[in-house]
Image (cartoon, rainbow, N blue to C red):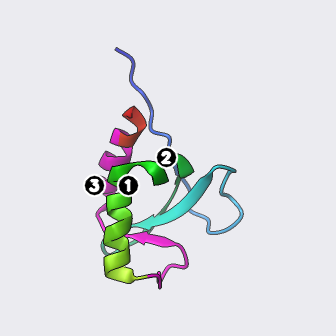
Amino acid sequence: MAIRMPRIIKKSSTTGDVPKGHFAVYVGEKQKKRFVIPISFLSQPLFQDLLCQAEEEFGFNHPMGGVTIPCSEDVFIDLTSRLNRI
């Protein structure tokens, strides 16, 4: 059985480092970390649920300047690793 590495690209800078076909999100409860993820996640129901939670908590005013996901980093990594298997 092969181990599949997640397609999340974790970056720390804020501009100009998002590859084509990806977008940046901010994740975390207190300290926000920036993740660059494939746009293909937008069509996945699990990720759409996270976006709905983000809309409920932040509306369309995201304090970090990008999409802010209201969950812990561990939950986000777990969810996106599941999306990579779909």
Residue on which the image places disc 2: 8
How many C-alpha atoms fall within 10 Å of the one at disc 2: few (<14), some, or many (≥20)?
some
Mark 2 lies on a secondary structure that is: loop
Q: Which mark is residue 5?
A: none
- Residues under labels 1 and 3: Cα distance? 12 Å
- Residues under labels 3 and 2: Cα distance? 14 Å
Q: Kindly identify the amino acid type of the residue bearing the numbered disc 3.
A: Val
Lower position in the chain sequence, tag 3 or tag 2: 2
**Residue 54 location (% of width, % of height):** 36, 72
Residue on which the image places disc 1: 47
Q: Kindly identify the amino acid type of the residue bearing the numbered disc 1.
A: Phe
How many C-alpha atoms fall within 10 Å of the one at disc 1: few (<14), some, or many (≥20)?
some
- Residues under labels 2 and 1: Cα distance? 13 Å
**Does the image show residue 28?**
no
Camera-nearest residue between 38 and 43: 43
Residue 81 belongs to the span the image colors magenta: yes
Q: In this view, does 59 lie to the left or right of 35?
A: left
Lower position in the chain sequence, tag 2 or tag 1: 2
How many C-alpha atoms fall within 10 Å of the one at disc 3: few (<14), some, or many (≥20)?
few
Camera-nearest residue between 46 and 11: 46
Give the extent of the magenta segment.
60-82
Camera-nearest residue between 59 and 26: 59
**Residue 34 location (% of width, % of height):** 49, 63
Q: Kindly identify the amino acid type of the residue bearing the numbered disc 2.
A: Ile
Residue on which the image places disc 3: 75
**Residue 1 location (% of width, % of height):** 34, 14
Look at the numbered discs 3 and 2 and tell me whether their residues touch, using CB distance below 8 Å: no
- Of circles 1 and 3, the one toward us is 1
Camera-nearest residue between 12 and 81: 81
Above or below residue 71? Residue 64 is below
